[in-house]
Image: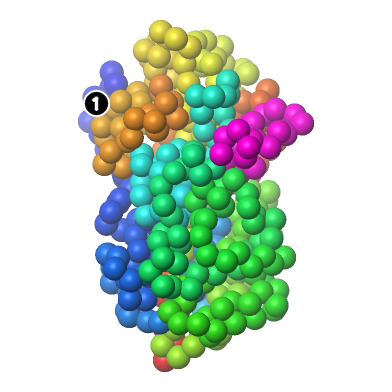
Amino acid sequence: MPCPGDRSPDRLSSQPSVPRYADASLGEIVPSLLAALGAPFRNALAIEPTDSACLFLVDGLGWELLRRHRHLAPFLGSLLAEGRPVTAPFPASTPVSLSSLGTGRPPGEHGMTGYTMALPTLDGPINCITWTRYGVEPPVDLRATAVPERIQPLPTLLEQAASAGITVTLVAPAQFEGSGLTRAALRGGRYDGVESIARPEATAKVADALHRTRPALVYTYHPALDAAGHRHGVDSDEWRGQLRLVDGVAERLAETLPAAGTLVVTGDHGMVDLGRGESERLDIADEPDLREGVRFLAGEARTRHVHAEDGAADEVLARWHARLGHAMWVVSREEAIDAGWFGERVLEHVRPRIGDVVAAAFGSIGVFDRAVDPVMPRVVAHHGSMTGDEQLVPLLTFRRR
């Protein structure tokens, strides 16, 4: 969809690839697995019938990144030929992706719209990873006031799976048990906390859960590839080391499967490095035109929800488009909704969580606010937008014969 006020042919050539909601997105993975396990769900991804399945989600594992570095990941690389990419939701960010994975719904329905997100009860965004006020120190736990089950009230697929007679186990970092995001997106089943899925005792827990009772679904998660990309960049030695580790973990998980068991490996988003120059790391502290009329920013550097002061939305849209239209799709809330960025429909209580202006990068650029978050401008790799490097994630399947 072209940006307002700019309908030229060259702009039309760089339109966003809207996520393939209800067809080939993260939201179809768990329903397809549950259908393969015999539960009454739609198997959109045609996963073979099984009575035990392990879903391994690697934070930051993008399809394009894996294809370019397959030589570092021989086991995962061997699955690429029969694998396929699916799309992360928009924005391509962990809280949004895990919520689509966990509910099977687009963000316009589950309501998690970014790494940080506006809530009507707060004068500023919430950090959806830590469930605290974004940019406020010391951090204040909001789980008692912004109750996760109310922020995301749809029943999760894990809850539905347990009701359908499937034994559901989450073998994931202990630090995330009971977190706001876990409660919002992945509630249901038994949470078996571990230090890291890369440790042998964690793999043993997965094996035990898969073998103990059938049908069984195990969800497991590894965050360190994403962390290495953020801190050091994709293709750094640290990131490469993490990809090798992930490959080894995936192979060990495959070896733990019962006969005819299934392993599915996916990611929540890809990543792109940003250069250090001001043209790629634009800070609104240095941009008076971008600050004018803006209450606060939500989202993250590559996709910004711009929440305007009352009556200023049109002017803010015009200024942001004039300044950033060369490198970002800059549209109004209504245009983003109408174009399906957040899914086929956006529920009324979700609409205020979307910015009056939505700016999503297609060029090598990120928008920062160091006054609110002084750490983010120093991060090397980012994600959130609808470029292939950020949006496409792998759907890799291994079946134990």
For the point 68% across and 37% down, which residue is it?
A: 141
Q: Is residue 143 magenta?
A: yes
For the point 51% across and 47% down, which residue is it?
A: 184
Tell me if residue 167 comes above or below residue 229 in the rendering. Answer: below
For the point 66% across and 61% down, which residue is it?
A: 173
Q: Is residue 13 magenta?
A: no
Spot occupied by residue 24 in the image (x, y as percentages of width and height): 31, 58
What amino acid is at disc 1?
Answer: Ser
Would residue 401 be found to the left or right of residue 378 on screen? left
Quadrant hosting residue 331: top left
Residue tagged 1: 8
Q: Quadrant of the N terminus?
A: top left
The span shown in magenta is 127-147
- Viewer-closest of 166 and 314: 166
Tell me if residue 171 comes above or below residue 111 in the rendering. Answer: below
Q: Residues within 10 Å of mark 1 (few under 14, many from 20)?
A: few
Spot occupied by residue 90 in the image (x, y as percentages of width and height): 40, 43
